[in-house]
Amino acid sequence: QVQLVESGGGLVQAGGSLRLSCAASGRTFSDYAMGWFRQAPGKEREFVVGINRSGVSTVYADSVKGRFTISRDNAKNSVYLQMNSLKPDDTAVYYCAAAETRFGQTTRWAHEYNYWGQGTQVTVSS
């Protein structure tokens, strides 16, 4: 079992920045690829960004490329999401997830993630 706890959400004006954190506990953090997903009201959950277990490979949704940056610190059992140039369309609940992929590679597919956090709300005002 892996427990994931997100933090860092909040209310920010358009153009502002937020940094989300996800703290993991339980099994060995570095065994898992990590990802961030989000779900806006009335919409399906969507992939935002993923990172492989070593942290050297990432994949981003087109909607956040150039604005969001994922990173991880395996020594601290944590993954981070730096969000810059935020837009009202970024408003959503953001979820951290862990995937035990075969080679530790990152993935954008929600069904490949084994563990999920409870989510943190991000609201961007116009």
Image (tube, grey):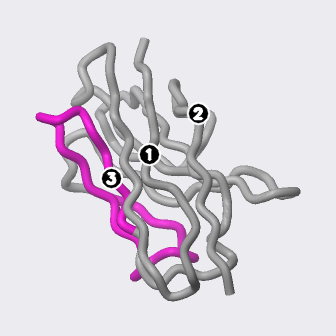
Point 61% across, 53% down: residue: 121
The vertical placement of 33 against 56, above or below, is above
Residue 30 percent coordinates (x, y): 22, 30
Quadrant location, the C terminus: bottom right
**Crowd band around label 1 with a 10 angstrom C-alpha radius: few (<14), some (14–19), many (20+):** some
Residue 11 percent coordinates (x, y): 58, 67
**Which residue lies under the disc numbered 3?**
80
**Tag 2's secondary structure?**
loop
> How far apart are the alpha carbons under marks 2 and 3?
15 Å
Answer with mark 2 or mark 3, whichever residue precedes in sequence. Answer: 3
Residue 79 in magenta stretch:
yes
Say which of marks 3 and 1 sits in front: 1
**Which residue lies under the disc numbered 1?**
7
Q: Nearer the viewer, residue 13 or 94?
A: 13
- Answer with the quarter of the image where residue 71 lies: bottom left
16 left or right, relative to 93: left
**Which residue lies under the disc numbered 2?**
118
Total count of labels: 3
Amino acid marked by disc 1: Ser
**Crowd band around label 2 with a 10 angstrom C-alpha radius: few (<14), some (14–19), many (20+):** some
The vertical placement of 72 against 17, above or below, is above
